[in-house]
Image (cartoon, rainbow, N blue to C red):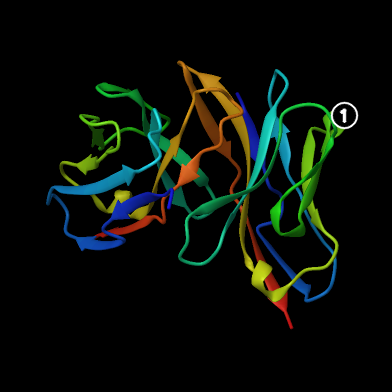
């Protein structure tokens, strides 16, 4: 089954404790991205990647890091989480870069930073 | 700057009633428009998309949307709502920037369905 998977689905942590949220897709998609969803704000892009070893900032990259060492994986790293990073996070992938390319979303990771 | 506005944060309808969710966009060029649905605890699923051509677009689950350039709108409609349609709905516009297609999302509309 074609899908985007994320782990963990739920995570509660404390301020300053480094964490990684994994994202994997099995569709051989070139493009992957991370979004955060906050009430009243919709989804905002954090980082995106156009290929292995090619990443760039989205609209809200502060406090986050990403890496793309393999085509299928695109982990999101919070080196020193803070309470304002409490949010629902989505990973997405798409085959191409055109504006008409559908993005496929993972199930989301709900992160709480105390 | 590109933006998407969904004026209704919450909407409640009765099962079997018709539904219209509003979406207005701001985009300089021809917009590529999407509607996504997020069921509780799930990721986002694409309902339909508009790129060009016929301004009335049919999607999955009986949904349709109409693109009106003069009103900068892309409203989502369904003639008869089912209880399983209760979810959050997001309108988005595709923006091609830096070699990548980014989705600009609206804030979402949460739909509740009364039996």
To which quarter of the image does residue A26 belong? Answer: top left
Q: Residue at x 79, y 50 (%)?
A: B64
Residue A47 lies, in percent from the top left, at 35, 32
Can residue A114 be seen here? no
Is residue A65 visible from the viewing direction of this image?
A: yes
Residue A35 or residue A60, whichever sits in front: A35
Mark 1 = which residue?
A: B70
Q: Is residue A6 left or right of residue B108?
A: left
Q: Is residue B91 above or below residue A9?
A: above
Outermost left residue: A17
Residue at left 23%, top 34%? A65
Res. B30 image quadrant: top right
Please rate how many residues cluster around mark 1, counting C-alpha atoms within 10 Å: few if below 14, some from 14 to 19, many from 20. Answer: few
Identify the residue at the far front of this view: A1
- Residue B6, given in percent of the width and then of the height, sits at 68, 47
What residue is rendered at 25% in x and 30% in y?
A68
Task: Tell me residue B102's x, y (percent).
Answer: 51, 29
Quarter location, residue A56: top left
Q: How many marks?
A: 1
Mark 1 chain: B
Q: Residue at x 61, y 43 (%)?
A: B106
The spot of residue A29 in percent (x, y) is: 40, 33
Of the 4 image quadrants, the one containing the C terminus of chain A is bottom left
The one of B59 and A11 positioned closer to us in this rendering:
B59
Q: A32 and A35: which one is in front? A: A32
| Vertical placement of residue A109 versus A45, above or below | below
Q: Is residue A34 left or right of residue B85?
A: left
- Residue B76 in the figure: left or right of residue A97: right
Q: Secondary structure at mark 1?
A: helix
């Amino acid at each position: 089954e074609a899908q985007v998977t994320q782990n963990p689905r739920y995570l509660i942590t404390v301020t300053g404790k480094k964490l990684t949220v994994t994202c994997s897709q099995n569709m051989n998609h070139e493009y992957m991205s991370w979004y955060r969803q906050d009430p009243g704000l919709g989804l905002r892009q954090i980082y995106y990647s156009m290929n292995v070893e090619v990443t760039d900032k989205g609209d809200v990259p502060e406090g986050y890091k990403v890496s793309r060492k393999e085509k299928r994986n695109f982990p999101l790293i919070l080196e020193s989480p803070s309470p304002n990073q409490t949010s629902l996070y989505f990973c997405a992938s798409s085959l191409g870069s055109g504006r008409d390319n559908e993005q496929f979303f993972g199930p989301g990771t709900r992160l709480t930073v105390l | 700057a590109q933006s998407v506005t969904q004026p209704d944060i919450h909407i409640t309808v009765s099962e079997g009633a018709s539904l219209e969710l509003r979406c207005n966009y701001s985009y300089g060029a021809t917009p590529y428009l999407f509607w996504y649905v997020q069921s509780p605890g799930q990721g986002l699923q694409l309902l339909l998309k508009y790129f060009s051509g016929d301004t009335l677009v049919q999607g999955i689950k009986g949904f349709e949307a109409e693109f009106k350039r003069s009103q900068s709108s892309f409203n989502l409609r369904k003639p008869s709502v089912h209880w399983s349609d209760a979810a959050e709905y997001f309108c988005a516009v595709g923006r091609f920037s830096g070699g990548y297609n980014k989705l600009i999302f609206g804030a979402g509309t949460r739909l509740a369905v009364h039996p």
